[in-house]
Amino acid sequence: MSHCRLCSGLCNRNKRLLDRNFREMAQDVFCLLIDVSDRDNSVAACDSCQRKVYNFYNFKHRCRQREQDRNSIKKRPISIGFSVLKKVPPPKDNAERCIGGAAKRPNSNTNPDDSDDDGMAPLEFDDNPRKKRPPPKRLLVRFTKEQLASRSKKELYEERRNLICEQCGKCVPDVRMESHMNNHLGVKPYICEEPDCGMAFRCANDRKIHRKRNHANEQYPCEICGKILGSTLSLKSHSYSHREKEFKCEICGLMMLTKNRKDIHMRVHTQKRDYKCPHCPKSFYVNTVLTLHLRSHSGEKPYVCHICHFANSHRILYVKHMKKVHPGEEIYKLCDMPKITKKDKTVTS
């Protein structure tokens, strides 16, 4: 028997506090640092405390999410966004439009029997041809003084762009709402049209970015190192590697390239884990780590070696395998893996 570290009661001998996920959940619930380096202190936790930690952590997670949504959207007055003028149909002219911009004007004084020798009426060209109607303009409805007194313009514009998901309650930009809803449904209706690719995406914008990155037959050299990139997006993301790290973490002093990476890094210190696994109680800081974790439940191994039968769910292990076992061979990307499997099937058949 052992003593529970959380309630000091007797419990079966276990090492639940050595699990990093459970320990961080307990630290978030109790707002205390649990040191497990000292061997004299117990690392056991009873079943009752484990259930309470999971329940309280999930409750705090939901409260934080709802508080964030309430502060960003629900307590704000409704602001009027951009409005587009309706297209007004052009006025109908009594003149019959003819080929080449000519118009035949009816004349009450003329006799219908009067015509040329060939039996056709003469064409009269329009002196004032109708100009092409310009496209409708977008009217910007300005913010009121009451709105600007409580919030900045940046917050008001973000409110116009963001929508609330009806299923999970998250605040999502309107351009990403289709991808977010397809993620709930588990469907990827947009398939790459390139031959021997077959990758599917949740929205048309993701497919467009994929085609620019992988299927554009263009070359963009880097001005600093001379590396050849296949698209402007790849060149832009590659240029970040040559920049100096400007953003510094105030807690640990780690330097980062962009503000987005700094915000993701701060979740380690605040213990903010918004990406929760639907199959187990684990939660993660970023969605990419959750995607890798879900492969452990589904058994998916997308990184396949084109020489031997090695397959893995992580790209790092795939790259290490290729460099160690097959040095000098080409290392493929994830988008090229379906091509490899198709080639193997055709060779074996």
Image: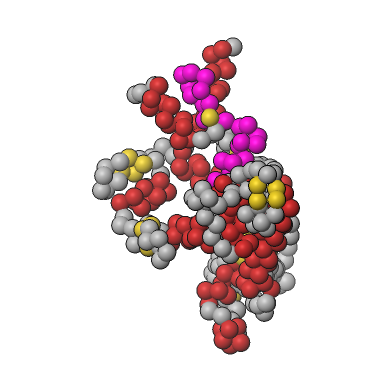
Q: Which residue is drawn at 31% across and 55% down?
A: 243
Is 171 positioned to the left or the right of 235 in the image? right
Give the camera-side residue of 110 and 260: 260
Between residue 343 and residue 102, name the one nearer to us.
Answer: 343
The image quadrant where one finds the C terminus is top right
Magenta residues, start to end: 289-311
x then y, percent, for residue 248: 37, 63
Display coloring: secondary structure
Give the percent coordinates (x, y) of residue 78.
68, 77
Asked if 150 appears above or below 130 in the picture, the reply is: below
Magenta-colored stretch includes residue 67 = no
Q: What residue lies at 40% left-to-right and 66% top-to-bottom?
A: 250
Specify whether residue 28 is in view. Answer: yes
Q: Which residue is drawn at 53% across and 13% down?
A: 347
* Quadrant assignment, res 62: bottom right
In the rendered image, which quarter contains the N terminus?
top right
Q: Can residue 58 be seen in this view?
A: no
Q: Where is residue 246 in the image (x, y as percent from the top left)?
A: 34, 62
User: Which residue is found at the position 40% from the left and 21% from the top?
Assistant: 325
Residue 297 is one of the magenta-drawn residues: yes
Q: Quadrant of residue 299?
A: top right
